[in-house]
Amino acid sequence: MEEELQAMDDALDELQVDQQDYGVYAGDVEVEFEEEELDDSEPDEAMDVELDDSEPDEAMDVEQEQGDNEQVHDEDKYKNLTDLQRVGIYEELLARSVNLKIKKTTTREVANMFHVSVYKVRRVWRRVKECLRQGIPVDIRSRKPKNCGRKRIVVDLSTVPEIPRSQRRTIRSLARALGVKKSTLHRMFTEGLLDRHSSSLKPYLKEANKKARLRFCLSMFDQQSLQNRPTFKDMRNIFHLDEKWFNTTQKTMKFYKLPSEENPHRTVQNKNSIGKIMFLVLIGRPRYNAEAICIFYGKIGIWPFVKKVNFYLEFVCW
């Protein structure tokens, strides 16, 4: 056993290397490096914030940064900074800086003060240094209104009158004819660039109908006023009589009920022939006295006319 230990010691002695041949020093040696100041005229790409000379040149503690960012509220962390917040951050950084140099902990302190992310504070400080480097006034306002967001889609609406009316009944069909998205065309409609018109059918008047209506209008002139100043009759001795039909129910009706209440069950023999009721209305012109007090409203009355015929409701005028 002793012989084996002696052999191992001899082998280790042979492997020892002369430290002086390789320039290795066994003792502790203090090495002094020349300190070089960072030039403010060049952008600092390695770090976002300039460090003070009094602080040691160390790497940022990543875990501490993440811990500070987690303290920021979720609703404020991803929110865009307002111009008022940017001004407040700039003033705090400027007050804590010395010759436009801040400590590495300053950005975290200001971020916690305003409840924002550290990276947003650094971006504001980079904007400040960039403006000072270019010799222009410091401008830290948001540049999003100019450079961000989707570009507005230009749609030529001058071709809308050339599209057939059958393809312009809905937003979807008109968007397909124009070759744009439905949401884009709907946004233009809300902005007032498009108008929606409800077209109703009008009676077709023949020449005889037009002449009859014209004769009726001429008959309403006061014969005594034709020589001087033609005026219409005051119609104080004329009453208007007309009828109006109403359906007794609707095909679809909405109700509000309790969950435990049964659904209403409504029946009719034919949904296209719903029972109707007719009202007869008679009105005239209101009358006023010399004191401008209404003495007659002109409402004579409204009378319902109902008659049940052939096992289903059919309403006719008596």
Image (tube, helix red, strand yellow):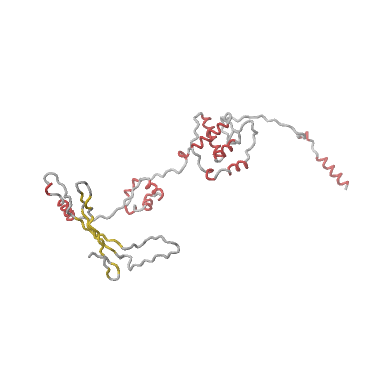
Q: Residue at x 51, y 43 (%)?
A: 79
Q: At which x and y percent is residue 152?
A: 42, 43
Which of the two residues, 109 or 32, is positioned nearer the viewer here?
109
Q: Is residue 118 above or below residue 268?
A: above
- Residue 145 as seen in the image, left or right of residue 277: right
Q: Residue furthest bottom?
A: 311
Which image quadrant is residue 40 in? top right
Q: Is residue 263 above or below residue 54?
A: below
Where's residue 70, x and y in %?
A: 58, 44
Q: Quadrant of residue 204?
A: bottom left
Of residues 118 and 20, the one nearer the viewer is: 118
Q: Is residue 199 left or right of residue 256?
A: left
Residue drawn at (61%, 36%) of the image: 105
Which residue lies at the image location 34% right of the left edge and 67% below the top edge? Answer: 268
Task: Judge from the rendering whether residue 41 lies leftward or rightward of residue 160; answer left or right.
Answer: right
Up/down of 93 relative to 159, above or below: above
Q: Position of residue 217 (x, y in %)?
A: 17, 51
Question: Relative to residue 39, is residue 207 drawn left or right?
Answer: left
Q: Is residue 251 above or below residue 168?
A: below
Question: Between 177 and 41, which is closer to the camera in this rendering?
Answer: 41
Picture quarter with the C terminus: bottom left
Q: Position of residue 179 (x, y in %)?
A: 39, 50
Circle count:
0
Q: Residue furthest front?
A: 291
